[in-house]
Image (tube, grey):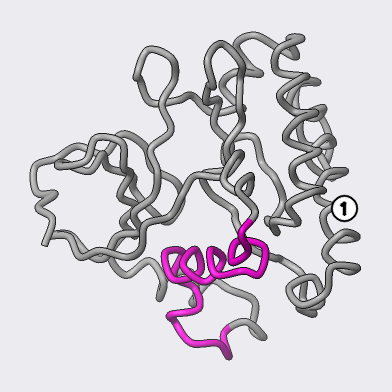
């Protein structure tokens, strides 16, 4: 068991906290808040309450998302824009999803795309990185939910920015056709790309109105 007692998290979302692995400094441990699955289920729409509490657990959903078809093939490029996943591990404060901890050129924790855009705007470097990320989505057919800038971090290969997904993996399609068909996966991904740019432009414009 990994001891996380008295270790401060470096980030947190609505459902999980993120810790640096105490023995592997290039790994991130994501731990759900205690009782969070039950809380999310309680506040869900009535038809979603028919599902089990486990289906609302972000770690279990992440585990399932990393089992998708596109990540089971031998494509050596599949991890270029996606934090690697190392499995579920037990910690002193609950089960954790263990993933790659993306670092910048100074070996600091990479900032999110959201923070980069709010700090520097749409630079030539980040535009090129986004175009490369978009091409990767089309070629890899990795399924994501809506691509939100705070779920992407700004990593580097040499001096080049390489964006990486750290959260929001999986399909949000009600009917799971993108999970079993390349044809529907391509259509699904085009919609995710369209929404990604819509969200980025919304962020850069001061978040007026609805980003969708």
Q: In which quarter of the image is residue 153?
A: top right
Q: How many marks?
A: 1
| Residue occupying image coordinates x 46% and y 49% | 84
The residue under label 1 is 191
Residue 73 located left or right of residue 98: right
Image vertical order of residue 120 relative to residue 150, above or below? above
**Residue 109 in magenta stretch:** no
- Badge 1 element: helix
Query: Which image quarter is the N terminus in?
Result: bottom left
Image vertical order of residue 68 relative to residue 104, above or below? below
Q: In which quarter of the image is residue 121?
A: top right
Between residue 179 and residue 205, name the one nearer to us.
179
| Residue occupying image coordinates x 43% and y 80% | 54
Query: Which image quarter is the C terminus in?
Result: top right
| Residue occupying image coordinates x 87% and y 52% | 191
Label the magenta part by its dominant secondary structure: helix
Q: Position of residue 8 (x, y in %)?
A: 19, 37
Image vertical order of residue 79 relative to residue 208, above or below? below
Q: Give the range drawn in magenta.
A: 49-74
Image vertical order of residue 119 relative to residue 168, above or below? above
| Residue occupying image coordinates x 88% and y 43% | 194
Q: Position of residue 131 (x, y in %)?
A: 80, 28
Q: Position of residue 140 (x, y in %)?
A: 73, 52
Q: Position of residue 160 (x, y in %)?
A: 61, 16
Label 1 CA crowd tier, 10 Å (few <14, some 14–19, many 20+) = few
**Residue 64 in magenta stretch:** yes
Residue 16 located left or right of residue 79: left
């Amino acid at each position: 068991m990994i001891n996380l007692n008295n270790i401060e998290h470096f980030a947190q979302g609505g459902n999980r906290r993120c810790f640096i692995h105490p023995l592997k400094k290039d790994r991130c441990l994501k731990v759900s808040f205690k009782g969070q699955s039950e809380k999310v289920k309680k506040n869900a729409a009535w038809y979603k309450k028919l599902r089990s509490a486990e289906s609302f657990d972000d770690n279990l959903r992440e585990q399932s998302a990393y089992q998708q078809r596109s990540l089971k093939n031998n494509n050596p490029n599949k991890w270029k824009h996606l934090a690697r996943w190392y499995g579920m591990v037990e910690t002193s404060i609950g089960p954790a999803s263990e993933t790659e901890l993306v670092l910048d050129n100074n070996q600091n924790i990479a900032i999110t795309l959201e923070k980069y855009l709010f700090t520097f705007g749409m630079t030539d470097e980040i535009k090129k990185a986004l175009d490369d990320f978009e091409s990767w989505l089309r070629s890899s057919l990795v399924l994501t939910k809506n691509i939100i800038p705070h779920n992407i971090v700004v990593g580097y290969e040499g001096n080049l920015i390489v964006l990486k997904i750290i959260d929001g993996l999986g399909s949000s399609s009600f009917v799971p056709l993108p999970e079993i068909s390349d044809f529907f996966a391509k259509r699904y991904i085009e919609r995710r790309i369209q929404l990604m740019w819509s969200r980025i432009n919304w962020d850069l414009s001061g978040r007026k109105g609805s980003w969708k």
